[in-house]
Image (tube, rainbow, N blue to C red):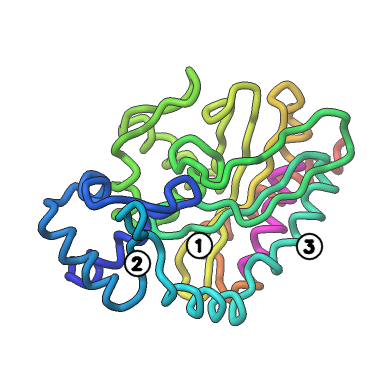
């Protein structure tokens, strides 16, 4: 890994939960010695990507990030492009739909849409989603490179009694996700919540995020499961197209098989 990459990678540790970090916190998170991390932070500070809070002496994002963020959103308005697919997804499934964007090693919630079909539903408030415990996270990990998967192994935090906490169990989930085309999180992130996610891809051909549906676990049955997955395929393909991406051929074939099976089930009902 180059020096530039190592320096820029430190930016991924900023989040809404941790808008400021000290040298020791960076060193622990990156598993590097303080001297090396300090050199990288100094380079980022000199370039304006980070700055020191004079009151706390902790680092925070600097002014150089703002014009890049505005330019990125202007050229690829992802938050805008997911609104209509999310609205359709929530309407057709009757459940909460949400989209997320992969930023470094974090999966950040981009937008969400609730449904008025039921008096009770799932409220998605999380700003970041765990890669190993959410339907969106599993969908992203399954179609990402080895580096991100390795990063997700440590640590595997336990959220419920159903959360996978070993790399072996996680790999089994990812293999099933690649086989079916969907990340399934049945009460692995939140008790009583069943999540189903599908990956979306950008213009570089790599997985860039996910779109998912979260529903109360007691409402999930075979019919709703088929409906959610069928609608996720439509939404994932639509968002991928808006982002200038292309669904990998193998995954596209898997989704085609699901759509065909769902149509046959609908014809027989």
Q: Is residue 111 magenta?
A: no
Which label sits on residue 84? Answer: 3
Neighbor class of circle 1 (other Cα within 10 Å; few <14, some 14-19, many 20+) is many
Q: 55 or 135, which is in the foreground?
A: 55
Q: Relative to 241, is 29 above or below?
A: above
Does 47 sit above or below residue 80?
Answer: below
- What residue is at 38 percent from the left and 60 percent from the top? 60
Residue 228 included in the magenta stretch of the image: yes
Q: Earlier in the sequence, mark 1 or mark 2?
A: 2
Marks 1 and 3 sit apart, C-alpha to C-alpha, by: 18 Å
Which residue bears the numbered disc 2? 51
How many labels, in total? Answer: 3
Q: Position of residue 239 (x, y in %)?
A: 66, 65
- Residue at point 55%, 48% (across, down): 181
Q: Earlier in the sequence, mark 1 or mark 3?
A: 3
Is 153 left, or right, of 126 in this rendering? left
Picture quadrant of residue 236? bottom right
Determine the CA span between mark 1 and mark 2.
28 Å
- Which marked residue is nearer to the observer: mark 2 or mark 3? 2
In the image, the segment drawn in magenta is 227-240
**Residue under numbered circle 1:** 208
Q: Are marks 1 and 3 in contact (CB under 8 Å)?
A: no
Residue 203 in the image: x percent, y percent? 52, 75
Q: Quadrant of residue 119?
A: top right
Q: Between residue 200 and residue 229, name the one nearer to us.
A: 200
List x then y, in percent, for residue 10. 30, 59
């Amino acid at each position: 890994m180059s020096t530039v990459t190592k320096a820029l990678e430190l930016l991924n540790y900023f989040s809404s939960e941790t808008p400021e970090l000290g040298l020791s916190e960076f060193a622990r998170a990156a598993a590097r010695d303080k001297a090396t991390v300090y050199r990288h932070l100094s380079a980022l500070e000199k370039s304006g990507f980070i700055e020191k809070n004079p009151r706390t002496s902790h680092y925070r994002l600097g002014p150089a990030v703002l014009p890049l963020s505005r330019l990125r959103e202007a050229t690829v308005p992802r938050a805008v492009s997911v609104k209509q697919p999310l609205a359709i997804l929530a309407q057709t499934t009757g459940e909460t739909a949400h989209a997320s964007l992969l930023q470094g090693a974090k999966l950040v919630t981009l937008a969400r849409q609730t449904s008025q079909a039921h008096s009770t539903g799932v409220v998605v408030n999380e700003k970041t989603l765990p890669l190993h415990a959410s339907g969106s996270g599993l969908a992203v990990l399954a179609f990402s490179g080895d580096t991100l998967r390795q990063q997700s192994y440590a640590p595997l935090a336990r959220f419920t009694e159903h959360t996978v906490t070993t790399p072996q169990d996680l790999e089994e989930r990812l293999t099933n996700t690649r086989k079916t085309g969907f990340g399934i999180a049945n009460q692995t992130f939140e008790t009583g919540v069943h999540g189903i996610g599908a990956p979306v891809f950008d213009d570089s051909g790599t997985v860039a995020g996910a779109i998912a549906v979260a529903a109360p676990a007691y409402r999930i049955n075979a019919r709703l499961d088929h409906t959610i997955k069928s609608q996720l395929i439509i939404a994932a393909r639509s968002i991928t197209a808006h982002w200038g991406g292309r669904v990998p051929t193998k995954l596209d074939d898997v989704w085609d098989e699901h759509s065909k099976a769902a149509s046959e089930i609908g014809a027989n009902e």
